[in-house]
Image (cartoon, helix red, strand yellow):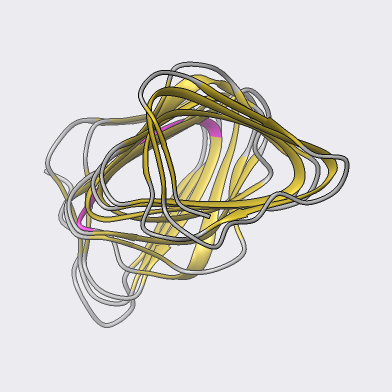
């Protein structure tokens, strides 16, 4: 039912945690449903949240801070404004972070598998591989991975995208729509359905860039081995 807590809240369940009314917690809220589900999708007003579950879905009408999260399957976080974190997040399968019109900033030592991002600006860090399921970003996107950055769905970023997989690979070969792209990797392959602008990029082995229309640049591009630029029917201007 409806709950209002002026400081901290801890809820532990043997199975699932759900709600029938809005929950308001001024400070830290800890929800522990190890092996089961947390479904808190009402018009909640949460400050900082810790989650332990197999599946979790949490909605906040304003900012939400992920204190820690250990999720054995899927996680969905929806915020009226910003999604940030104060501790590491571990999600075994799909994570969905939705803060349409605001920011997703998750730059701790996270362990994420596949990620959906919906935001104005987004920055996500993973200590291992990260798979971009889909991403719709109306301004800038930064993705940093300890190993590889790949995708399973399209990525749309209106302005600057920076993909940093130092020593490993960035492979983004779906029907993407980028503004400008910066790449830091050993190997990189990027596809855009329209124009693509290469921002500052450092690739220590091979680079492939495929564009539906033009390939241009706004910063220096350094490629140690083979660079392939494919803009069939249009222009490549790297001056």
Residue 109 in the image: above or below residue 140: above
Is 90 in front, or is 26? 26
Percent across and percent down for residue 181 are 28, 46
| Magenta stretch in the rendered image | 179-186
Q: Position of residue 232 (x, y in %)?
A: 33, 78
Q: Report which quarter residue 136 is drawn in.
A: bottom left
Residue at (70% x, 53% y) in the render: 74
User: Residue 111 placed where, x, y %?
Assistant: 67, 29
Residue 98 appearing in the image: yes
Residue 69 rendering spot, x and y as whole percentages: 63, 30
Residue 185 covered by magenta stretch:
yes
User: Can you see residue 161?
Assistant: no
Residue 170 inside the magenta-drawn segment: no
Q: How many marks?
A: 0
Task: Judge left or right: residue 111 versus residue 191.
Answer: right
The C terminus - image quarter? top left
228 or 125: which is nearer to us? 125
- Front one among 14 and 135: 14
Secondary structure mainly formed by the magenta segment: strand
The answer to whether residue 73 is above or below residue 43 is above
Query: In the picture, residue 195 is in which quadrant?
Result: bottom left
Q: Is residue 127 above or below residue 169?
A: above
């Amino acid at each position: 039912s409806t709950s209002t807590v002026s400081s901290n809240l801890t809820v532990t369940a043997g199975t699932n945690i759900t709600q029938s009314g809005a929950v308001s917690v001024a400070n830290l809220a800890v929800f522990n449903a190890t092996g089961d589900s947390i479904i808190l999708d009402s018009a909640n007003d949460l400050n900082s949240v810790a989650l332990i579950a197999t599946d979790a879905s949490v909605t906040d009408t304003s900012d939400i801070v992920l204190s820690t999260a250990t999720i054995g399957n899927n996680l969905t976080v929806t915020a009226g404004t910003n999604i940030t974190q104060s501790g590491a997040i571990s999600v075994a399968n799909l994570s969905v972070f939705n803060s349409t019109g605001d920011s997703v900033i998750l730059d701790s030592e996270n362990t994420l598998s596949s990620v959906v991002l919906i935001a104005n600006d987004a920055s996500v860090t993973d200590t291992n591989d990260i798979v971009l399921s889909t991403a719709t970003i109306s301004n800038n996107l930064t993705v940093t991975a300890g190993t590889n950055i790949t995708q399973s769905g399209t990525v749309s970023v209106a302005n600057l995208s920076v993909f940093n997989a130092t020593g490993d690979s960035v492979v983004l070969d779906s029907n993407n729509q980028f503004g400008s792209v910066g790449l830091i990797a050993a190997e990189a392959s990027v596809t855009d359905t329209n124009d693509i602008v290469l921002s500052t990029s450092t690739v220590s082995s091979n680079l492939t860039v495929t564009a539906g229309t033009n390939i241009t640049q706004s910063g220096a591009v350094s490629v140690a081995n083979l660079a392939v630029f494919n803009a069939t029917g249009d222009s490549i201007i790297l001056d």
